[in-house]
Amino acid sequence: MSSELEDVIVNQDSYGIRLTDTADGRNSASMLISKMYAWRGYAGTHHLGDDPNRITLTATDKGDVVGTLTLGIDSPIGLMADQVFKDELDAHRERGARLCEFTKLAFDPAVRSKISLANLFHLAVIYARDLHHCTDIVIEVNPRHRRFYQSMLGFEREGEMKTNPRVNAPAYLLRVGLDYATEQIRQHGGTFSTNTTERSFYPYFFSPREEAGIINRLLRIDEQAVA
């Protein structure tokens, strides 16, 4: 991919979201991940490498990285979640699913913006669905975070709780179909100012009109990178 993809994808005042495609960008994201994981008491190293099957998105505020999420696309070498949940993932591969995973999510607690977090999630959905044609998102989560993903984003539990050796902590595997996420975005995206319910996180996602503009821009960038 071209380094042009380092351009800001979303730019609102001093806040932006960018696709991290440089060593400096990955290092900034890695530092935030390590900081937040250490604060939570998780073990392990959390360096972001240059992997063509992994896409790292970062949220910045006045130039500082305040949030990051990595999207992993399934490939012959598998996903990170295969280390613990290979049987569960293989069951979906056998039915023809094209899987992707959200990993290395970290957000600076000083930036408590639901919109910022939703922007990261939504852009990862767009990359997974529109650029890589995935059908399902999976994520390994600590038990204390499971309720948010299930009740607010529609993820479902896959199998039983296991120990994730990468962070030496218990984890559940959760999954959501991108067809479900797409429908929720169509119905609720961009309605947070008028939608008073707290039973869904989708009102904080981009509106369908905003989503269409982002998709068109990313597809043009992708075409230029291939050309």
Image (tube, grey):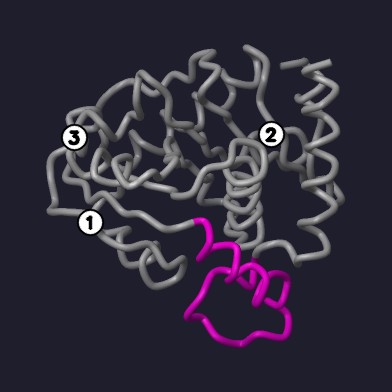
Which mark identifies residue 84?
3
Q: Is residue 113 left or right of residue 15?
A: left
| Residue 183 locus on image (x, y percent) | 59, 70
Local secondary structure at mark 1: helix
Disc tally is 3
Whether residue 127 is in magenta: the answer is no
Q: Is residue 213 left or right of residue 35?
A: right
Labels 2 and 3: the sequence-earlier one: 2
Image quadrant in which you'd find residue 113: bottom right
Q: Residues within 10 Å of mark 1 (few under 14, many from 20)?
A: few
| Residue 129 locus on image (x, y percent) | 60, 46
Identify the amino acid type marked 1: Pro
> Foreground: 126 or 201?
126
Q: Is residue 64 left or right of residue 77?
A: right
Whether residue 187 is in magenta: the answer is yes
Residue under the point 12% across and 53% down: 160
* Residue that numbered label 2 is attached to: 64
Identify the amino acid type marked 2: Asp
* In this view, the mark in front (1 or 3): 3
Image quadrant occupied by the N terminus: top right
Q: CB of mark 1 within 8 Å of CB of mark 3?
A: no
Q: Which residues are magenta?
A: 178-204
* Residue that numbered label 1 is attached to: 143
